[in-house]
Image (tube, rainbow, N blue to C red):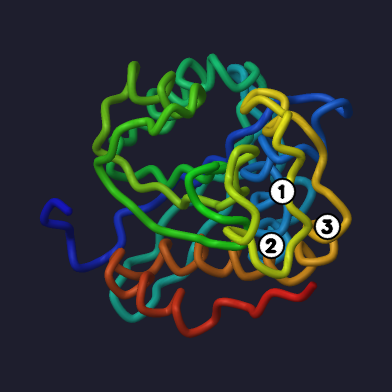
């Protein structure tokens, strides 16, 4: 991992997903779901919402913490559909005069088992088309919160305590499918935990947030 700042530079938190009710509870919309929980966690009022430049946007102010000054924060859900997410995020960086290092991107990751969460910086796209779109337009120098959804082709036993996905599903079908019953039960504890890690990134270095992540990770249930 590249050298990172010791205090947080995050001002913009974006969850990836697809707009519309058809996709609302699919695995590919994990980023949108985390944003919903983060809005509640930060107590951002409904009147902070606006729709602008291919994005749903919520603006707020973060008070000073131990290692940070007061700052404006922006939460957003791109409305371009996943494969064109980079266009929406480029607009956000332009509008708010921010740099990629001010961005935390939240997205589903099929290379992590369901319930697993990792923070990262300056990585490739891992085959994720939304992430590929973002990297293509703003570069790789931004922070990521990777939300594990598992993979359709994972052998049985790689997702202990969860119902295995049908192996016949192709990757595209898998990410656009809704959460199964066992996953849905666990989302009640997982989503608040993922939202907490996103909030930690507003005030902490990535190393501090990683340490905190290991402390508050919830246990899976069957």
Which one is in front in this view, the residue at disc 2 or the one at disc 3?
3
Label 2: element kind: helix
Q: Furthest residue to the left? A: 3
Mark 2 or 3, nearer chain start: 3
Q: Residue at the spot x=87%, y=26% of the render? A: 22
What quarter of the picture does the N terminus occupy?
bottom left
Mark 2 or 1, nearer chain start: 1
Q: CA distance from mark 3 to mark 1?
A: 12 Å
Q: CA distance from mark 2 to mark 3?
A: 10 Å
Q: Which residue, given by chain and number where applicable, does mark 1 sit on?
A: 33
- Whether residues under marks 2 and 1 lie with C-beta atoms below 8 angstroms apart, the answer is yes
Q: Residue at the spot x=48%, y=29% of the render? A: 128
Label 3: element kind: helix
Q: Which residue, given by chain and number where applicable, does mark 3 sit on?
A: 184
Say which mark, if any, is on residue 191. Answer: 2
With 130 as the anchor, is 159 left or right in this view?
Answer: right
Q: Furthest residue to the bottom? A: 215
Residue 49, image x, y percentages: 72, 40
- Whether residues under marks 2 and 3 lie with C-beta atoms below 8 angstroms apart, the answer is no
Mark 3 or 1, nearer chain start: 1
Q: Is residue 165 above or below residue 207?
A: above
Residue 182, image x, y percentages: 83, 61
Quadrant position of residue 17 = top right
Residue 47, image x, y percentages: 77, 46
């Amino acid at each position: 991992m590249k050298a990172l700042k010791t205090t947080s530079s995050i001002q913009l938190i974006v969850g990836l997903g697809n707009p519309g009710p058809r996709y609302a509870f699919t695995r590919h919309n994990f980023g949108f779901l985390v944003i919903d929980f983060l809005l509640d966690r930060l107590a951002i009022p409904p009147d902070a919402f606006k729709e602008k430049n291919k994005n749903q946007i919520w603006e707020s102010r973060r008070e000073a913490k131990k290692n940070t000054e007061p700052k404006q924060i922006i939460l957003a859900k791109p409305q371009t559909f996943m494969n064109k997410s980079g266009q929406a995020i480029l607009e956000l960086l332009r509008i708010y005069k921010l740099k990629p290092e001010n961005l935390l991107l939240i997205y589903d990751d099929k290379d992590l088992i369901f319930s697993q969460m990792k923070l990262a910086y300056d990585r490739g796209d891992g085959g994720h088309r939304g992430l590929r779109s973002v990297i293509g337009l703003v570069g790789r120098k931004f922070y990521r919160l990777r939300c594990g959804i598992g993979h359709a082709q994972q052998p049985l036993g790689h997702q202990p305590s969860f119902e295995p996905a049908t192996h016949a599903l192709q990757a595209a079908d898998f990410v656009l499918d809704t959460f199964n019953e066992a996953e849905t039960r666990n989302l009640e504890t997982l989503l608040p935990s993922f939202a907490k890690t996103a909030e930690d990134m507003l005030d902490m270095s990535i190393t501090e947030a990683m340490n905190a992540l290991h402390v508050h990770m919830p246990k899976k249930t069957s």
